[in-house]
Amino acid sequence: MTNKTFVTHEALLALIEEGLNAAVPEAAAPYAHGHPPALLAEAMRYSLLAGGKRLRPALLLRTVEMLGGDLQEALAMACALEMIHTYSLIHDDLPAMDNDDFRRGRPTNHKVYGEGIAILAGDGLLNSAFEGMLCNALRYPERLQRHVAAIEAIARRAGVTGMIGGQCLDLSSEGMGGDESLLSYIHLHKTARLFIAPVVAGGLLCGAESKQLSALEVYGRNVGLAFQIVDDLLDLEGDALAMGKATGADAKLGKLTWPALLGVETARQKVADLRREAFGALECFGDAAKELLGIGDRLTSRKA
Ligand code: GRG
C-alpha cells in the first residue's frame, strides 16, 4: 500500500488549461515586436483552447506525479504535447489531408481562418511547443540533461520516424487497401507514438530507471493502439454530436482500419487484449499507478 496523494482530475485539467492559456497569450497591440500577429495568435488559441480531452498532457503529468516529480516543472512539457497534438489536428483537417469541417465541436481552423492561416497556426503551435519546453529547461540547470532527454523523446516520436511518418503512410495509402502490417505501422506511428511520448518523457524528467522506462513505453504503446482502434470503431458506429466531429469519414476516404480489415468483433477483442497488456506493464509501479490506470481505462472505454 502507498500513502501517495493524487491531484484531483478537475485540478489537473485546470492546471493544464491555465498552462495552455499562458503558452499562447492573446495578442498584444497591433504590430508589437516580439509578439505574434493578432490573427495568428487568435487562430492558434481558437484550436488550442477549444476543449479537447487533454489526454497527452494528463498522461505526462500523471507519470510525473507517480514518480514523485514536480508538476509545475513538468507543466510546460505537458502543454507542449497538447500544442503538438493540436497542430497535427489542424493540419489533418485541411482539405489536402482529411478535409474535415468540424473538430472539437466547432468549425475546423481552416473553415474559420482560411487554409493559409490554418497552416501557419499549426506551424506556430509546433514551434511554440519547442520554444516553451526549451525555455522551461533553462530554468532548471541542475536537471538540464533530464529535460533535454525528455524533449528529444518527444521530438522523435512526433517527427518523421513517429507521427509525421505515420501520417505520411496513412495519406499515401488511402483507397489502396493494405494489410495488417501496414495498418499496424500507421497506427503505431500516427497515433501511439504521441501516447508513448508523454509517459516516457515524464519518466525521463524524473530520472526513471531503464526498466521503468520500458514499462512506460509498453503502457503508452498499448493504450495508444487501443485508443486508435476505439477511434475507428467510433467513426463507424459513434454519435457525431457526442464526438464533436463528423463520423463515417474513414469509410468515405477508403481508409484502412481494424474494423474494416478484420471486422468489428475482432477489433473489439484487440482493444481488450491491448488494454490488458498495458495495465500489466504498470504493475511494477504498484498503487502509485492508480491515476495512469484510470486514464487508460477512460480512453479505452470512451464513447465519444
Ligand atoms: C498532420 C503530421 C500530422 C499528423 C496528424 C492527429 C493525426 C495525425 C491525425 C488525426 C486523425 C485521427 C482521428 C487520429 C486518431 C487518433 C486521434 C489523434 C484522435 C484525436 O485525438 P483526441 O481524441 O482529440 O485525443 P482531442 O480533441 O480530445 O484532443
Image: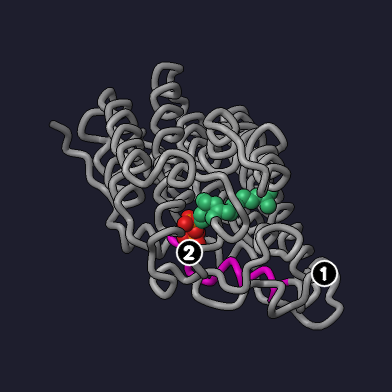
Q: Is residue 41 left or right of residue 60?
A: right
Asked whether 200 falls inside the magenta stretch, the response is no
On the question of residue 141 being in view, the answer is no
Give the residue at the far bottom of this rendering. Answer: 30
Q: Residue at x 28, y 41 (%)?
A: 293
Q: Is mark 2 within 8 Å of ligand 1?
A: yes
Compared with residue 129, is residue 36 higher up or lower down, i.e. above or below? below
Q: Quadrant of the N terminus?
A: top left
Q: Which residue was labeled with disc 1?
A: 116
Q: In the picture, residue 59 is in which quadrant? A: top left
Compared with residue 286, is residue 198 higher up or lower down, i.e. above or below? below
Element at label 2? loop
Q: Position of residue 216 (x, y in %)?
A: 41, 29
Label drawn at residue 34:
none
Q: Which residue was labeled with disc 2?
A: 52
Q: Residue at x 37, y 44 (%)?
A: 62
In depth, the one of 242 and 47 nearer the eye is 242
Compared with residue 42, is residue 256 higher up or lower down, i.e. above or below? above
Kind of residue at disc 1: Gly
Q: Residue at x 33, y 47 (%)?
A: 300
Query: Start and end of the magenta stretch?
Result: 41-53
Compared with residue 114, is residue 6 higher up or lower down, i.e. above or below? above
In depth, the one of 142 and 186 nearer the eye is 186
Mark positioned earlier in the residue sequence (1 or 2): 2
Q: Position of residue 277 (x, y in %)?
A: 32, 28
Q: Is residue 145 left or right of residue 59?
A: right
